[in-house]
Image (tube, helix red, strand yellow):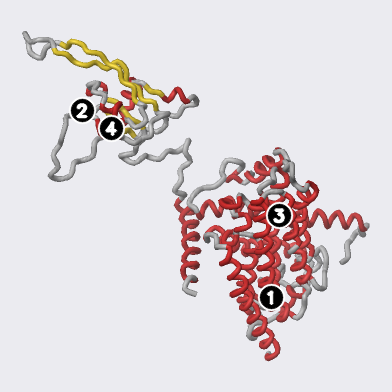
Amino acid sequence: MPRVPGLVKGLGVTLRTMGRTVTQGPVTVQYPRAKEAPPIRARGVIALREENCTVCMLCARSCPDWCIYIEGHKEKAPPRRPGGKPRTVSALDRFDIDFALCMYCGICVEVCPFDALFWSPEYEYSETRIADLLHDKSKLGEWMETVPEAPELEAGAEKKGKK
Amino acid sequence: MTFAIELAYWQQTILRVVGVLVALLLPAGTFVYVFLFKMMSFMQSRIGPNEAGPYGSMQLLAEVGKFLQKEDIVPAKADRRLFLLAPFVVVVSAFLVYVAVPFGPDAFFADIDTGIFYVMAVSSISVLGILMAGWASANKYSLMGGLRAAGQLIAYELPMVLAVVGVVIQAGTLNMQEIVIAQNEGAVFGIDWIGNPYVLTQFVGFAIFLVATQAELAQTPFDMPVAESELVTGYMTEYSGLRFLLFFIAEFATAGAFAAVAATLFLGGWALPWISIDSDWMNILGPLILFAKVMLIAFLIFWFRFTYPRLREDQLQQVAWKFLVPLALANIMVTGILKVAF
């Protein structure tokens, strides 16, 4: 009977787990009273850094389930140098993400060329009404505070983009 | 048995009924809380119920209350009378087993000369109840579950009875009270200070009995009759409310009953080797000692339950017929030869 040692080993595993739970406590956390720190790259919610957004619509176009709503308009900004022509820039009027639709694929974060979208590990934003899951740019901007620092680059890697 | 006060027959009967209810429900409730709620949680590295009462100890009352509030649904095409009766048949089987288990020198419900034979016989009444439940539900999954349960229970009845025969040969009696006394007064190879709990000399029988118990209770390595994922809890699919609760109680009450039988047959029952078995105190101490031994056996049963995954149906039958039955027969033969030789 070659299976017997495995059977006995299994009994040992459960018994050891019981001992560890009694002496050191369980691996689970009593959620509303105690909270776990999410891992550093957890996909909790998508945060927006509004000043980096150029209304390029790449995120809205790449979103597989069309949960990003963007509206903008052109406006004149003061010239860079004195005496210059006023610049034309895109201003963001509306940037909404419907988290009832979002499937947390992160393509929008990947595709953003100006580092305006970030993953935040924040996860406590459930609502009792599904329509309340549509969050606007001010709410998305508040979540920027919870975005962790970008991890250190690997040795020899070149830093790209502006942050 | 002499009481200071003489009791009428009906008074004695009421006392006995209350006693067997306590003997049935106390271990069942303790098992559910200590093993099903807490030990299983710890073995899975979580806390388990902890809101109701201190350390969640009132959780069981909350569950019972929940079941009692639920509607007792009978399917339209069910065989109504059988459907309503089935859970009671299953529970009664557990009650009847307790009748023959002795708790002390004078503390027993009935001193039956063929006690262990009676226990084996009444414990299989639950098969009838399960078949009734499966058939009367008018549901193919229930029927499959009922048939699987019947096939399994009948298959494992045999090794269980054969495992008991070894004990009976060694004790030379079928009376459970006398089996206890024989263990208390016996000796293993001339060493008599621990008596002779048959777990030592009948270890093979003890192991077979435990495996068969596991299968009789449909606990996890052998839980195909109630397989949640395939048969949606088998023969219990259509039951709700009080009747589902009865099946649930029966499961743990039967666990307690079989644990009590195993403790009586193999661990020395209510007696401890260092305490005189004739003392009157044993009538009070005996049930506690037996309960401690029952908890030990139940710990083993539930430890296996929380560790092992489910067997396949054909593997289950193979274990019973190709392995346990021949082993039990060999055990009987060796026991008989040794009994004659010494």
How far apart are the two marked residues, 1 and 2, measured between alpha carbons?
78 Å
Instruction: Tell if the residue under mark 3 belongs to the same chain as the one under mark 1.
Output: yes
Instruction: Give the quadrant of residue A84.
Output: top left
| In this view, the mark in front (4 or 3) | 4
Instruction: Tell if the residue under mark 4 belongs to the same chain as the one under mark 2.
Output: yes
Residue at image point 55% right, 54% down: B40
Find the residue positioned furthest to the top. A83
* Residue on which the image places disc 3: B250
* Residue on which the image places disc 4: A109
Callout 3, which amino acid?
A: Ala
Q: Chain for mark 4?
A: A
Residue B48 x/y as whole percent: 54, 47
Which one is nearer the viewer's eye here, A4 or B281? A4
How far apart are the two marked residues, 4 and 2, measured between alpha carbons?
10 Å
Residue B167 x/y as whole percent: 70, 77
| In this view, the mark in front (4 or 1) | 4
* Residue on which the image places disc 2: A114
- Where A137 sits versus B55, above or below? above
Mark 1, residues whose alpha carbon is within 10 Å: few (<14), some, or many (≥20)? many
How far apart are the two marked residues, 3 and 1, measured between alpha carbons?
24 Å
Which one is nearer the viewer's eye here, B126 or A139? B126
Find the residue positioned furthest to the left. A83
